Amino acid sequence: MSYAMSQALQEAVYQHLLADAGVSALVGGDVYDAVPAGTVPELYVSLGPETVLDRSDVTGDGAEHRFIVSVITQSAGFGAAKEVAAAVSDALQDADLALSRGTLVSMRFDRATARRTGRAGTIRQIDLRFHARVDDTPTL
């Protein structure tokens, strides 16, 4: 197994979401790897946790990354969050991302969960789970 491509995948996903016209039209640059301290925007996208499984075979090292991208809003209702979640899903489904290490073999949407969080359920959060299959391609 190789966890070596995790940072490369995360950076590529982050940059791809920032550059995507559909996502940026809705949240601007409010896409975070780590949510900033202090006041946060009313609507933003945050990269979340991941689970990585070995997918190595006789041809080399590989891994399946199951990761979450969250859409979070303080707006009443889920409407705005669902619009952003759709844009994130569209941006990442079958995305062709260039990694600084390794090769992205496939990227697909798995599932989403919408829920109320925070005190008195005032925050709306949609967690979108994606699966990315990566192979390690060592530099010669």
Image (cartoon, helix red, strand yellow):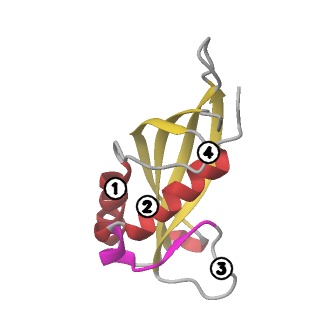
Q: Amino acid at mark 1?
A: Ala
In the rendered structure, the answer to whether residue 3 lies left or right of residue 135 reads right
Of circles 1 and 3, the one toward us is 1
**Residue 81 point in image, percent of width and height:** 37, 67
Quarter of the image containing the C terminus? Answer: top right
Asked if disc 4 and disc 3 are in contact, CB closer than 8 Å, the reply is no
Disc 2 to disc 4, how far (Cα)? 16 Å
Q: Disc number at residue 91?
A: 1
Instruction: Classify 5 as above or below 7.
Output: above
Q: Is residue 79 visible?
A: no
Instruction: Say what secondary structure mark 4 lies in.
Output: loop
Asked if disc 4 and disc 1 are in contact, CB closer than 8 Å, the reply is no
Q: Quadrant of residue 32?
A: bottom right
Q: Amino acid at mark 3?
A: Pro
Mark 3 lies on residue: 36
Mark 4 lies on residue: 101
Instruction: Say what secondary structure mark 2 lies in.
Output: helix
Q: Is residue 81 visible?
A: yes
* First of labels 3, 2 by sequence position: 2
* First of labels 4, 3 by sequence position: 3
Instruction: Classify 42 as above or below 2.
Output: below
Disc 4 to disc 3, how far (Cα)? 27 Å
Mark 2 lies on residue: 16
In the rendered structure, the answer to whether residue 86 lies left or right of residue 7 reads left
